[in-house]
Image: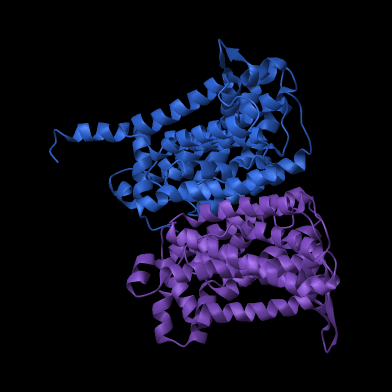
Amino acid sequence: MTTATAPLRRRARRLRVPIIWWLLVATFLIAWGLVGQFGRGDFIAPSNLNNIVERATALGIVAVGQTFTILVGSLDLSVAYLISVTAVMASYIMQGDPSRVPLALVVVTAIGLVVGLVNGLLVTKARINPLIATLGVGLVLRGLLNASFQNFAGSVPASFQYLAYGTIGPVPVPMLLFGAVVALGAWTLGRTRFGAHLYAVGGDRATARLSGIRADRVVIGAHLVASLTAVITGVYLASRLRSGAPWIGPDGVYDLESIAAVVVGGTLLSGGRGGVLGTIAGVLIFATLDVMFNQLGVGSYTKQVLRGFIIIGAVAVYAYRSREVVG
Amino acid sequence: MSVERATTTPAWRTVLGSIGRVAPVFLVLVLLIAWITTINPSFIEPAQFLNFLRRSSPLMILAAGQLFVVVTGGFDLSQGSLITLTVLGGALLAFGDPANTAWVIAVLYGIGLLVGLFNGAVTSFLRVPSFITTLGMLLTLKGFALLWTGGAPRGALPDNFRAFGRAFVEGVPLLGRVPWAVIVLLAFSAMFIYLFHYTVLGKQALAVGDNQRAAALAGIHVARVRITAFVISSLSAVTAGIMLGGFSGVSINVGDGLELQAISAVVLGGAALLGGRGNMPAALAGALTLQALFTLLNFLGLPSPLRVTVQGAIIIGAVAYAAWRAVRAGQERGA
């Protein structure tokens, strides 16, 4: 390869559509066909498309953060309880008073940063396997939360529900929020030094360190990003539900589902390869199927059975192509 | 490493030697039991202690099965859902009739076998990471259990089914009443220790986890070893489910989170996640330690939500200590 063709090749690689987007298109077309044939309602009505994006928003935002941790070869199982903590603390501090909104946002952001920092330090400095470290942190959060709150706590002011229910022109605010998080995530991974370091550390930690990258800082940074996205999801859910309850995080299975979405989206569980756009395709596939199952009248238990197989099947599609040794 | 050792030293010496290397869990276990005893002196009397072992037996068996998967470098997240399916499905199939128990148990083990084969085959042949395979299986099995029973427990477990978890053998010299569960536990523990430390399978599992490619080049049938590990894990989950159904009854949440407790127990017992290192007696002790910890927090009168917090902190602390020891001993491994 000559130096002249290198930039061209790089651009070509960037433009290549990941296979997962084809899967998304296929899923969408199949859903459209099935619903048209057997279901109720019009699958491609704007209200329905809106419904799909709405379902994808909460999971999608935290999945963007999860992409960062998985790219550096870590993962974060504490996000579900951090979402609960955020939603509960935000609505508890706001108590329906608009003037307390800034305080609430500062507090939950600070909590998120502390949790992310603890996760990062446990994984890097204490050398604990990320699965165990973030599971432990999740348990700690769960205990503290359940010891303090048993039910919906406080409420968000009506004006704050703009975040979940407002529109700017024809576009719903949550869609803009989702889009902004995705754009920021994609930009960080693709255009910043931090992003490049994430791939380097995830690909080969020792080599990255020998190349002068402070690997520990990069891993900690990824955990901070994951925690912050969990905070955003928590705030969004508080706004949508009008109040925060301790069970909203674990009930949404945001920990395991966000990991599933990231891996379905083509990011290697071992790190170093993948990106935010694949993750979003994964999240949209889940949401599309969810809406399709609803319109077809499939029961929630059947839905869960199918979802398990869909996760395995989607990952199998290209895990098989990549010929990687897996654990 | 352990493989090479095994060829030069007698097997019993390997077992003792590796216990020596992962000793902290035994020390922690003894300290916890001592602490509980100072609060409740009758805890170490045979009756109470056997009862403690009885309550620990499902988690210990579960952890033993999980260890096989963990040393090959995988995870089995589907164990908890399989337990739920075992309990709900068992109640529905048997419907309270003792005559049904034998074939119901056979059917449940059959389901376990299929689940293990599926997990192993998908991971080995389709190259899906086991974390994802078994996560999908977790969702599927829980959904299937709820779908099958219509969302709420139906039927009942007959008494002879529940006997494995709750019956006692009366009039044993010195010990008094011995729970069936403890006898089952001892039998399974002996079998697991034999399988893990005294058979080719155990050595091959460690070799596969240490370096899959090297193991394959050394002539090990990697896929067969991994599938066997998943099958053992699933069968141990069915066993744990039968015992849990015996003493805690039928509920749709019976298995929730047990897979993560089993993984924690295995790690407390010195096994390396991502494979290649593990010890069966230590993993069993890890599960017993977790259960002792729950008991202690109970005796200390901590509000139950905070017990979870302490549990999380202690798991982190124990694993951090193990990692620190490993670094100090100069056997640093990635992750």
Residue A63 left/right relative to A15: right
Q: In which image quadrant can residue A253 be found?
A: top right
Q: Nearer the viewer, residue B156 or B271?
A: B156
The color chain B is rendered in? purple
Instruction: Identify the residue at image location x=54%, y=32%.
Output: A33
Against A106, residue A135 (above or below) is below
Colouring used for the render: by chain
Q: Residue furthest top?
A: A169
Residue B317 left/right relative to A9: right
Q: Nearer the viewer, residue A317 or B316?
A: A317
Image position, residue A13 (x, y; %) = 28, 36
Against A317, residue B13 (above or below) is below
Image position, residue A311 (x, y; %) = 53, 47
Res. B322 visible in picture: no
Question: Which quadrant would the C terminus of chain A be assigned to in this image?
Answer: bottom left
Image position, residue A130 (x, y; %) = 51, 51
Q: In which image quadrant can residue A168 be found?
A: top right
Colour blue maps to chain: A
Instruction: Identify the residue at image location x=66%, y=60%.
Output: B82
Against A14, residue B70 (above or below) is below
Question: Which quadrant would the N terminus of chain A be assigned to in this image?
Answer: top left
Instruction: Identify the residue at image location x=52%, y=33%.
Output: A284
How many marks the image carries: the answer is 0
Q: In which image quadrant can residue B237 be found?
A: bottom right
Image position, residue B190 (x, y; %) = 63, 81
Res. A227 visible in picture: yes
